[in-house]
Image (tube, helix red, strand yellow):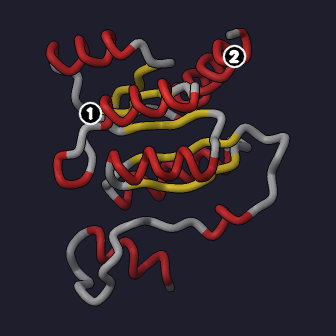
């Protein structure tokens, strides 16, 4: 029932639920050996699908953020092995700036996940020198390969 309310809220059909974060009941699992991933995505349906896909691929989702400020706070709090970061987050906050801050403060690799692939955005992504870029829409296989590559490079650093 909670999932249905979240989806309805995301599409503007349920004004009674004030928090726009998408929660997964699996965030509380104890998973120390499984790669831990933080999802920063402000579109609820996309976030729920991404979280579900990550869990089916065997990853542990540490949390979900909808703004760049929240992404930095969640990364500090949960210490994931990787962050999947949308470039444009809630209220126009900048995922690229958040990714740079997370990487500089915590050394956590960040993969950008975005529908935006214009020249200016791609130049900013390239300048940020993050672990990868995944253009929406993407397949489960593409997601898995980008994560594997990012985690592998991170382990070698």
On the image, the x and y values in percent for residue 137 come to 35, 35
Earlier sequence position, callout 2 versus callout 1? 1
Q: Is residue 79 visible?
A: yes
Task: Give the answer, above or below, for where 33 lies relative to 152.
Answer: below
Compared with residue 125, is residue 33 higher up or lower down, i.e. above or below?
below
Side (left or right) of 116 relative to 135: left
**Which of the 4 image quarters holds residue 128?**
top left
Q: Secondary structure at mark 1?
A: loop
Mark 1 Cα shell of 10 Å, populated few (<14), some (14-19), many (≥20): some
Question: Can you identify the residue that label 2 sits on?
Answer: 152
Question: How many labels, in total?
Answer: 2
> In the rendered view, would you say 103 is above or below 9?
above
Residue at image mark 1: 115
Give the left or right position of residue 15, taking residue 112 as reference: left
Name the residue: 35% across, 75% down: 19
- Farthest residue to the front: give it: 105
**Percent x, y of residue 109:** 55, 25
Q: Residues within 10 Å of mark 2 (few under 14, many from 20)?
A: few
Q: Residue at x 39, y 81 (%)?
A: 5
Q: Secondary structure at mark 2?
A: helix
Task: Please identify, in this view, whether the residue under mark 2 or under mark 1 is nearer the observer.
Answer: 2
Q: What residue do we see at 16% from left, 13% from top?
A: 119
State whether residue 137 appears in this view: no
Residue 36: image quadrant is: top right
Say which quadrant the C terminus sits in: top right
Measured in 3D between alpha carbons, the distance from the residue under mark 2 to the one under mark 1, in whole angstroms, is 25 Å
The percent coordinates of residue 86 (x first, y second) are 35, 39
Residue 145, image x, y percentages = 60, 22
- Say which residue appears at 18% left-offset and 54% top-offset: 91
């Amino acid at each position: 029932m909670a999932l249905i309310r979240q989806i309805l809220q995301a599409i503007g059909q349920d004004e009674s639920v004030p928090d726009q974060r998408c929660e997964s009941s699996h965030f509380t699992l104890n998973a120390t050996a499984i790669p831990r991933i933080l999802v920063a995505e402000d579109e609820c349906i996309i976030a729920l699908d991404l979280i579900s896909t990550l869990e089916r691929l065997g990853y542990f989702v540490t949390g979900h953020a909808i703004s760049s400020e929240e992404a930095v706070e969640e990364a500090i709090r949960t210490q994931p092995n990787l962050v999947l970061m949308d470039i444009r987050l809630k209220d126009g906050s900048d995922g690229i700036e958040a990714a740079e801050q997370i990487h500089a403060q915590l050394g956590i690799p960040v993969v950008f996940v975005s529908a935006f692939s214009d020249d200016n955005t791609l130049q900013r992504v390239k300048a940020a020198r993050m672990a990868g870029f995944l253009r929406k829409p993407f397949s489960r296989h593409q997601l898995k390969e980008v994560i594997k590559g990012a985690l592998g490079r991170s382990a070698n650093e």
